[in-house]
Each structure stands twice: as structure tokens, then as C-alpha cells.
Image: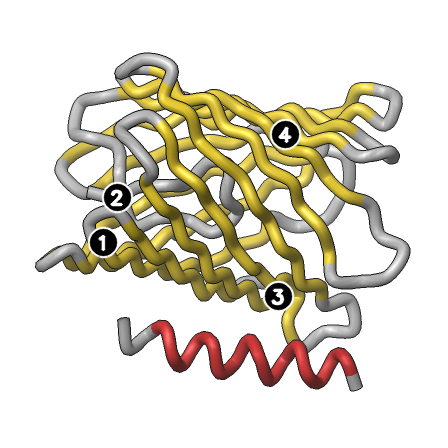
Amino acid sequence: MKRKVRKILTFYVSLFVFTLEVWACRPLVTEDAGTVSSGKPGLEISLEHCEEETVFCPVIMYGLRNKLDIGTEIPIVFRPEQKVNELTLRAKIGIYEVNGLSLLVKPFFVFPLVSEEKPEFTLLGAISKNFKKYVLHFNLGMGKNLFSGLASELSLSDRLRLLGEVYAENIFSSENTMNLRLGMVWRITSFVDLDFAVDRRFHPGTQTVFVSGLTFNF
């Protein structure tokens, strides 16, 4: 019964949001609809920790042209042994932007490095709507499984933003999950942002995940 409720909730949230100078990204799972500036590099470093494992993940990006960037993600898992499980190659392509509303598509491949599984392709769509101090982000992605995310951010000052999201993975599968993530971003300098978040799954007995990271704005 709970699974059906989650599926129905995600479906109606998706329908609702689609009737909706940004950009959140870290520490959210939900993508924003912004891209790295043309000719500029980008770097994000994240650390996620729970009782079972710690995941360190650098994300390297580069703006190829206006509204188009490419990047790679290399998560390193400590459980407790060190292990690089996969490599992600992706692009972000901005396709629409007017009056604070932006639309982006993100195709990406995930290459397993410790198994004989085939590379997995996913296509994700992201919408961001800027209401000055308040921003909404919505994602819908399809690959091996369906993903949906709804996030918001509130600017309290030039240096501090509060963020929150609800995201669902493996929708319509027996392994479906839904998570709540709450966090903040502190702009240390004009080049460096520090973030922190707490992530909790809507399942009894699951662990709380603590997330922190840095974003370098070149």
C-alpha cells in the first residue's frame, strides 16, 4: 500500500511541476538547469557518509560552448576497503531559457568498473524556475530505472542558501525508494561554496546519510 502511495504521489508531483540565475546542484541529488560557462572549468567535491560506507566523489566539468558542458564523475567507495565502482561520462545541454524558466537535458553513460555489466545510458530532463530569492528544480530521468526529483532553494543572503528536496529512484520497481534531503550552502568566497546536508529515506530502519562538499567557481 505504501509503495502505491509513493508512486501516485510522484506521478502527480511530476504533472504539477511541469506547469511551472539559478543554480543549486550541490548538495542536491536533483539537477539544476544551469551549465558551466563557455571556456570555463568546474569542479565539485563531495563526501557522503553513513554507518556502512563513505563515498568520495569528484566531479570535473568544462563548458564547451554557451549552454553546453561536459563532465565526468568518479565515485570512490570506502566499505571499509577503497574501491572505484564506476565512471560516469555526461553532458548538460541547455535548450530553453526565458523569464527565469530554464530547461535542460542531461544524457550520461555509467560504466561499471568492478563487474561485467554493460554500460548504462540514462537521459534526464531538468527544469528550473527562478522566483528571485526562491528557486524550484524538477527532474525526470529514464534509463534502466525511472528517477524523479523535486527540489527548492531559498536565498537568505548573498552568502547563505537553504535547500530541500524529495527524490525517488527505481520508480515502478520492487526496489523503489524515496528520500528527503535538507541542507545549506555557504559561499566562503566568490570562488568557493561549502555545503552540508542530511539525507533520510522514507523506510523504517534505514540509515541517515550525512553529505558535505565543495564547489569551485572558476
Per the image, the residue denoted by label 2 is: 22
Badge 4 marks a residue whose secondary structure is loop
The crowd level at tag 1 (other Cα within 10 Å; few <14, some 14-19, many 20+) is: some
Residue drawn at x 45%, y 25% as measured from the top left = 44
Q: Position of residue 55 (x, y in %)?
A: 70, 29
Q: Please state, as top left, top right, bottom left or bottom right, where the N terminus lies in the image.
A: bottom right
Q: Are marks 1 and 2 in contact (CB under 8 Å)?
A: yes
Q: Position of residue 215 (x, y in %)?
A: 41, 23
Look at discs 2 and 3 and give the one toward the viewer: 2
Residue drawn at x 52%, y 65% as measured from the top left = 148
What amino acid is at disc 2? Answer: Val
Badge 2 marks a residue whose secondary structure is loop
- Which of the two labelled residues, at mark 1 and mark 4, occupies the earlier sequence position? 4
The crowd level at tag 4 (other Cα within 10 Å; few <14, some 14-19, many 20+) is: some
What's the coloring here?
secondary structure
Q: Are marks 2 and 3 in contact (CB under 8 Å)?
A: no
Q: Are marks 1 and 3 in contact (CB under 8 Å)?
A: no
Q: Position of residue 176 (x, y in %)?
A: 72, 68
Per the image, the residue denoted by label 3 is: 145
- Which of the two labelled residues, at mark 1 and mark 2, occupies the earlier sequence position? 2
Per the image, the residue denoted by label 4 is: 75
Q: Residue 131 or 97: which is nearer the viewer?
A: 131
Task: Quadrant for residue 39, please give it.
Answer: top left
What amino acid is at disc 3? Answer: Asn
